[in-house]
Amino acid sequence: MHNYTLTELSASLRAKKISSTELTQHFLARIEKYDKTLNSFITVTPTIALEQAKQADLHLQKGNGSPLMGIPFAHKDIFCTLGIKTSCASKMLDNFIAPYDATLVSWLNQAGIVLLGKTNMDEFAMGSSNENSFYGAVKNPWDISRVPGGSSGGSSAAVAARLTPAASGTDTGGSIRQPAALCNLTGLKPTYGRISRYGLIAFASSLDQAGPLTQTAEDAALLMNSMAGFDEKDSTSIEQPVPNYLLTLNDSLKGLKIGLPKEYFSQDLDPKVSTTIQAAIKLYEQLGAKISRVSLPNCQLVIPLYYIIASAECASNLARYDGVRYGYRCNNPVDLNDLYERTRGEGFGHETKRRLLMGTYVLSAGYCDAYYTKAQKIRALLIEEFKAAFKEVDILLGPTTPTTAFKLGEKINDPVSMYLSDIYTIAISLAGLPAISIPAGFINGLPLGMQLIGRPFTEAKLLNAAHRYQQVTDWHKKIPENFNL
Amino acid sequence: MTSAAHKQSKQNKLESYPKSTDAWESVIGLEVHVQLSTQSKLFSGAATAYGAEPNTQACAIDLALPGVLPVLNAEAVNMAIRFGLSIQADIPHYSTFARKNYFYPDLPKGYQISQHENPIIGRGQLTIILENGEEKIISITRAHLEEDAGKSLHEGFENRTGIDLNRAGTPLLEIVSEPDLASPKEAVIYLKTLHTLVRYLDISDGNLQEGSFRCDANVSVRRSHQKKLGTRVEIKNLNSFRFIEKAIQYEIDRQIAILEKGGDIEQETRLYDTDKQETRSMRSKEDAKDYRYFTDPDLCPVVINTDYIEKIYPTLPELPQKKLVRFQKEYQLSAYDAGLLTAVRELADYFEAVVKEKVSAKLAVNWIMGELTAALNKANLSLIESPINAQRLAGLLQRIEDNTISSTIAKEVFEELWVSNQTSDEIIQEKNLQQITDQAAISKIIDEVLIKYPQQLTEYRAGKDKLFSFFVGQAMKASGGKVNPQQLNKLLKEKLNS
């Protein structure tokens, strides 16, 4: 049952071949069986899941409900879920039961999904390996000595091991696309403003964007139909009509102009990665696409750019965790400073503190112009560069990551090397563009992802290009053997 | 050191100083926080009413729960624009919100959403009228929207501090003036003018006790020939006109005393102690916080186009200064009377409603500022709560003007009006208070008085003129105050001198 895509399960549910309750029980059993190894869930919610499944079955019996009715699902533990612990993988929020649903959560609830639980992640979404979690590292189902990527590592490992048919993630600099690439999944980061951020616990507000982690582009399209849309509670969400993403999935790619950013195919690129991506490009040519080269020179600067902007925003966003109103509070504070210092000193993990220090530094008087203000100017230039590139092409294509999944512990003490694993995804976040990572092949038994980048609000085009590729390849169908029993 | 010696040494010191016989000049700029009277908060839907149970008017957004986002209250923007238009300000096409980052328990997000680089209201001006009647234009640098913090409660919690977040997120308009004010008096006139203006615009209740109108003052002094401004000191959180004047005066005196002793002024923030009536240091420039301002990524820029401004413009009320001029012209009021009436919009409206009922302006002013104000003060009521509305008061004044009753009797009727629902006419009828204007009746009353006091009559006729008023008084008393005074005077004089 777990070998089916979300789309297939949706059809089976509606054809009454299976019930949501059966499906839910099946996935709960898989979580029970495999998650001790993977650690992909922070909270499993069997009671809620079975109750929701029961309700969904009632609707399905009457022939009611959206295509997502009764589909088991998992939310990254960054989304607030009413009455359910919402920890952001931090000791700081270990005791936090959200008193409200994030807009995304509420919309998917209305569509009828069944919540299996909340997935593990890097603390406050800061990380590329899912090793920065208060609840311990998540293992990659393709090789449990390796990382699943981050920060949506719990969601990607859970979907890769088919502990859930699909999951939500968030992407600030690559946190959906990079784990999707490392776990052989389809991961879509929509245009900034496409999905509401209300109830998504903020890391870097100008970059954070929710999206689906799925087995196929078709599954992603199905989910996007319920996830996307304007939300008046989020001032940065954009009032733009939501197309039915399923309708254009099979459009022809004849004449599609694909650009290859030359900075993404430099001499430093691992030859095996290069070969794999080149093969995918060949396929696109066979599907009728026209390939050309473009240049995005400021992409060289994206790592420092990102760590200035994202850290500045996070230092401010995380100031609310002060031990005063909710969350972790240190024992017996003697005065206000002691309360702040020990609460935050004890409540946050190392990487979070590193970013808080960086972020505070780049905004401080005397340094702000040299760092934050300058970074914003370069960000504006970068946006212009992408605009110029998109005058010539419809889609940009390149590797999602410079390597396949690395070993647990390999980069944890070398933050710069860790940060470099997002080198291909960060620029897109800074420019607010939509991008999708899809499976493109395997290197030494480990999956490699390919990234398609589009103009703002061209998610339908990206899903179409991804879907057509998946029609002629089967990388995305491969499941890690040890979890396919 | 004897006092004389002390004086001597002080003089010597002064003499050794760069010689300046020029007078000291004070330079004052004000930052006023006006709480806007919106129904809900600046970035959330929670109510803003004052005095609710702690933390009952704080929603998820005000509590800064994880994941919440701010949404700008359009009404607050509206109010800011109204203010901008009323001070002929530059209203930028584009304005942004910034985060002012600092930690404090009553600041839930760890930052305040304010405006830094692109305020909603740019440069404008406010004309004030000095005590000598001269006009002075005070430049306003800017006005920006920001959210208020909550309150820390130190009483009633042993060794702990309570936090009330009802006020957190309440919209404020911070109005920053140029250092154009030359004295504590001018500062207070500016504040009162501003206070009147925001209430006219109906953008704030201006309640000083509840903190709806708070002020920080930047004060420095310099020799009058000196061009460069002196080092300024900021005095925080002044919330009564009286204290503002005292605090600024204290600070000016303090600075002059330091400079005259050859000392330097330290740039710092000081608090005014209302009990000791002095300012004391709160933090020095070195301790000044680094607020790490940056544009709030949760909020989009506010774009104000001309159409929007043109829609708001016609909704502005007649502004106090315009009304002041009109009142003097249209009703021939003195500057003083017109000033009193136009200081509060409700008062001006009340006055006009009375005058509209064909009551003379002067009589209306006298009664509104006299009897009515006194009665309201005594009962601790505001004009809006007055048991006597404009129409009822006008009904009374009409009867004075048509001589149905005298002013003295009118006061009696006024007291009745205050406690009953009757009209003046009903009261006059019922109590039979009509003035006696019948010549024969008055004559009869006078005759009776003259018979009753033969002694006084003899004295008067012997030349004791002062007794005239004695007879007036007796006649009035005999008539229950109802005799028409002019007629009485005339007739009495005739009879006495006959």
Image (tube, coloured by chain):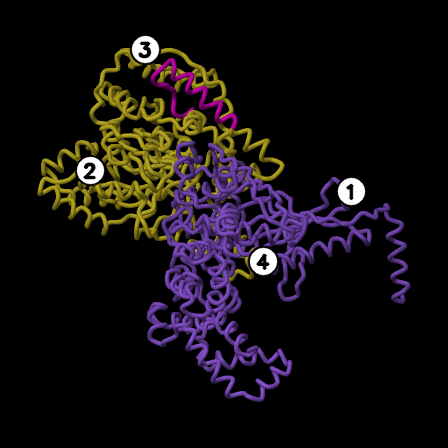
**Amino acid at circle 2:** Leu
Identify the chain drawn in yellow. Answer: A
Q: Position of residue A463 (x, y in %)?
A: 27, 24
Residue A68, numbered label: 2
Q: Chain of mark 3?
A: A
Residue B182 visible in image: yes
Q: Are marks 3 and 4 in contact (CB under 8 Å)?
A: no
Q: Is residue A309 magenta?
A: no
Q: Is residue A402 magenta?
A: yes
In the structure shown, which secondary structural element does the residue marked by tag 2 occupy? loop
Q: Position of residue B303 (x, y in %)?
A: 43, 33
Mark 4, mark 2: which one is toward the viewer?
A: 4
Q: Which residues are magenta?
A: A377-403
Give how far apart the Cα atoms at labels 3 and 4 are: 75 Å
- Establish if A216 lies above or below B146: above
Give how far apart the Cα atoms at labels 1 and 4 are: 30 Å
